């Protein structure tokens, strides 16, 4: 018998797959390294800022 999936918890980390050009990805990773941050951290911040601009802060 298969295992049942648990309902997603709001604080659970999940992945978001995004397709971008290799050169764009490489430039982004390099820029993040230059300012001592990670691509994941910057993408998360972008998403938070984007949602805040739209007034969707109830997430």
Image (cartoon, rainbow, N blue to C red):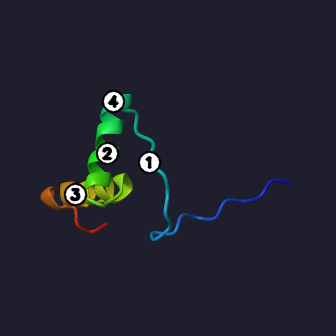
Q: Is residue 4 left or right of residue 23?
A: right
Residue topped by disc 1: 16
The CA span between labels 4 and 1 is 19 Å
As drawn, 17 above or below 22: below
Crowding at dot 3, Cα within 10 Å, few <14 / some 14-19 / many 20+, comes out as some
Of tags 1 and 3, the one toward the viewer is 1
Q: Quadrant of residue 30?
A: top left
Quadrant of the rendering where the N terminus is positioned: bottom right
As drawn, 39 above or below 25: below
Secondary structure at numbered mark 4: helix
The CA span between labels 1 and 3 is 16 Å
Q: Position of residue 49 (x, y in %)?
A: 19, 59
Of tags 2 and 1, the one toward the viewer is 2
Q: Nearer the viewer, residue 22 or 33?
A: 33
The CA span between labels 4 and 2 is 10 Å
Give the residue furthest to the left: 53
Residue topped by disc 3: 51
Q: Is residue 56 left or right of residue 39?
A: left
Q: Is residue 17 left or right of residue 24?
A: right
Of tags 3 and 4, the one toward the viewer is 4
Q: Position of residue 54 (x, y in %)?
A: 15, 56
Q: Position of residue 12 (x, y in %)?
A: 50, 67
Name which of mark 2 and mark 1 comes first in the sequence.
Answer: 1
Give the residue furthest to the right: 1
Q: Quadrant of residue 24?
A: top left
Residue topped by disc 2: 30
């Amino acid at each position: 018998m298969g295992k049942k999936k648990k309902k997603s918890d709001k604080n659970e980390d999940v992945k978001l797959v995004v397709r971008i050009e290799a050169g764009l990805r490489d430039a982004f990773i390099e820029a993040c390294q230059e300012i001592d941050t990670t691509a994941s951290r910057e993408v998360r911040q972008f998403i938070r800022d984007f949602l805040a601009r739209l007034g969707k802060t109830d997430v």
